[in-house]
Amino acid sequence: MVTTCAAAFNIQPDGGIVLDGDHAPGTSIGCSFEDLGIACTRVGTGLYLVTGPGIQPAAGWRASVYRDENDEQTIRLAIQQEADAVLYSCTDPATGAPKDIVYLLTVRVNVTLSDDGLEGEPA
C-alpha cells in the first residue's frame, strides 16, 4: 500500500532545517520526519533545494514567508518541482534580485511512502 505523508518544516537562511523547539517539523499520519529522507541545501543566493524520495509541493498551502514589522513579506517566493526535489527561489520584493530567506521560510511538502518504508528504497 502506498501512502502520502505531508511534512511542514522551517528552512533557515543557510539552508538548514530547524529540527528542535517551537519550529520543529510536523508530519501527518504519525510518520517520523527523520524517516522521510528530506534534506535541504542552499545552492546559491536565494536558492534552496529540498530533496527526498518522491517529494512534491503540497496542494493548497505550500509555504509561509516571514513578514517584517510592517506586515510585508520579506521575500517573494517561486516554487518549482524538480526530479525528487523542490526548488524554492527567493527574491527581493522591491528589486527582484535574488535574496536569502529572512529568519525562516515555512514549507509544506508531500512524500510518498510504501508499507516497507520510503518508496523506491529496500525495506
Image: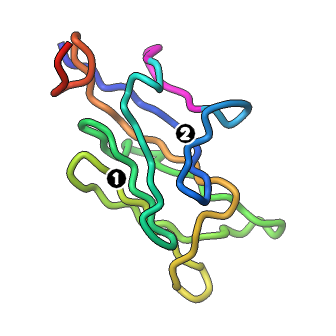
Q: Quadrant of residue 88?
A: bottom left
- In the picture of the structure, the residue carrying the numbered disc 2 is 9
Q: Position of residue 51 (x, y in %)?
A: 34, 45
Q: How many angstroms separate mark 1 from mark 2 (CA)?
A: 14 Å
Q: How is the image coloured?
A: rainbow
Which of the pair 32/1 is nearer the observer? 32
Residue for point 77% across, 66% down: 68
Mark 1 in CB contact with mark 2 (< 8 angstroms): no
- Residue at 49%, 25% (x, y): give it: 27
Is tag 1's residue or tag 2's residue first in the polypeptide sequence? 2
- Magenta run includes residue 7: no
- From this view, report whether residue 29 is shown above or below residue 106: above
Quarter holding the N terminus is top left
What type of secondary structure mainly makes up the magenta span?
loop
Residue drawn at point x = 61 percent, y = 53 percent: 12
Q: Classify mark 2: helix, strand or loop.
A: strand
Q: Is residue 3 left or right of residue 41?
A: left
- Residue 5 x, y percent position in the rendering: 37, 25
Looking at the rendered structure, the kind of residue marked 1 is Val
Left or right? Give the position of 81 relative to 26: left
Q: Which mark is residue 86?
A: 1
State which quarter of the image contains the C terminus: top left
Q: How many marks?
A: 2
Give the residues drawn in magenta, as a range: 25-31
Is 55 rendered above or below residue 31? below
Mark 2: amino acid: Phe
Residue beneath the point at 45% across and 48% down = 40
Please say if 103 is above or below 20: below
